[in-house]
Image: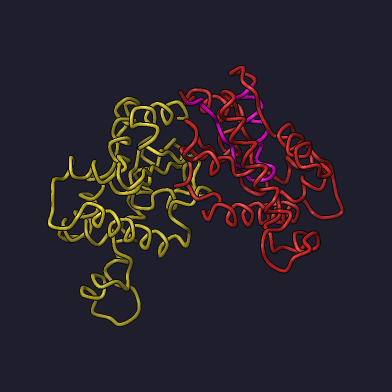
Chain colours: A red, B yellow
């Protein structure tokens, strides 16, 4: 029998990770996010910070080519994708869990009984939230959001060939800005 | 004080209209769909069946040009859009309600306290459903779905300049195929 898994894709600053952690906590199941990153790091021998960055970049981007020694063929980002794919599949086989980000929805599409969630919010809600969560930077919060969203979308598109944030890819999409974090948590829990 | 309104956009065959009617029934508020059409018909003096068709076609399409006597400028579809805009605004001012289709989410974007819902499902779920609901036709159910979706998307895009089915346009999007009609009803009710 397959385990019930919740995958959460999210716009940067929408609170998707917070929602995932709360849902997992209330359901008493694990939530994989930074834990997952660490596991990837251990297995690959890569420096964890590099992996954190690389996970946001589609191969062919400037980071990927800076790290790749080949003009074509698989590069480091592709290698990470393979490891990530394997780890996410294993985690879903191990037991019920919440997995935030990392294209888990796509990776588990045929392998798990999976509730696919996408969380988004408008720019002003997210801008306020990232300043509160991560502090001020030289770059404006709006620009940080746009950059991050663009990278996530490109990464998702490259590896899944699907459009990130397209309603039809998910069982449910939620606007955390208009609905509120707590209502999002309640709905996901109810659907589990 | 503004009334609380639920707008439901939906893919053809996804059960969005059924969901809207059930939600309205359980909340004890009106649901506007064919009623709305009729109101449009009465006010415009147009034949009701023509309006039903025209509502699905973006101006510039074959139907619009067939009915329009001008090369450019507003045509009958634009005229209908104006009437529809006015009626939907009035209905939302009159009291809480559910409005299915007709770009009501866009029309009410600044005018009402509005819960914007999009309902979709995969092709096979919808194909089975439309045969059960509307019976067999000469054209395959898959083709009927594709034609209808294409028209709705074009109509939506033309008048709202937004992408139909794009998660970011809605407070919540629901896959009625994987979640089931009843769960969709329960969630929308809960958010109201």
Residue B118 in the image: state x and y as whole percent: 42, 44
B63 left or right of B173 in image: left
Is A19 contained in the magenta span? yes
**Vertical side of A10 occupied by B73: above or below:** below
Residue A37, x across and y down, in percent: 74, 38
Residue for point 56% across, 28% down: A93
Query: Does A5 appear in magenta?
Result: yes
Residue in front for this viewpoint, A31 or A126: A31
Give B35 or A173, whichever is nearer the viewer: A173
Q: Residue at x 53, y 23 (%)?
A: A189
Give the magenta part as a residue range: A2-24
Q: Residue at x 53, y 54 (%)?
A: A163
State whether residue A164 appears in this view: yes
The residue positioned 81% from the left and 40% from the top of the image is A134
Labels in figure, total: 0
Q: In the picture shown, does residue A37 fall above or below B9?
A: above
Q: Is residue A113 left or right of residue B178?
A: right
Image coordinates of residue B93 in percent, x first then y, are 39, 42
């Amino acid at each position: 029998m397959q385990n019930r898994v919740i995958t959460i894709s999210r716009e940067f600053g929408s609170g998707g990770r917070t929602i995932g952690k709360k849902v997992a906590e209330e359901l008493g199941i694990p939530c994989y996010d930074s834990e997952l990153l660490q596991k990837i790091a251990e297995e690959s021998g890569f420096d964890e910070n590099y992996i954190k960055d690389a996970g946001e970049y589609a191969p062919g981007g400037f980071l990927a080519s800076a790290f790749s020694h080949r003009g074509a063929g698989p590069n480091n980002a592709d290698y990470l994708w393979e490891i990530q794919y394997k780890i996410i599949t294993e985690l879903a086989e191990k037991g019920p869990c919440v997995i935030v980000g990392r294209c888990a929805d796509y990776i588990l599409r045929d392998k798990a009984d999976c509730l696919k969630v996408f969380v988004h919010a408008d720019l002003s809600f997210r801008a306020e939230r990232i300043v509160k969560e991560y502090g001020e930077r030289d770059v404006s919060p709006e620009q940080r959001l746009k950059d991050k969203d663009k990278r996530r979308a490109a990464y998702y598109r490259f590896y899944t060939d699907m459009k990130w944030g397209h309603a039809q890819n998910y069982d449910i999409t939620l606007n955390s800005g208009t609905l509120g974090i707590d209502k999002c948590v309640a709905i996901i829990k109810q659907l589990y």
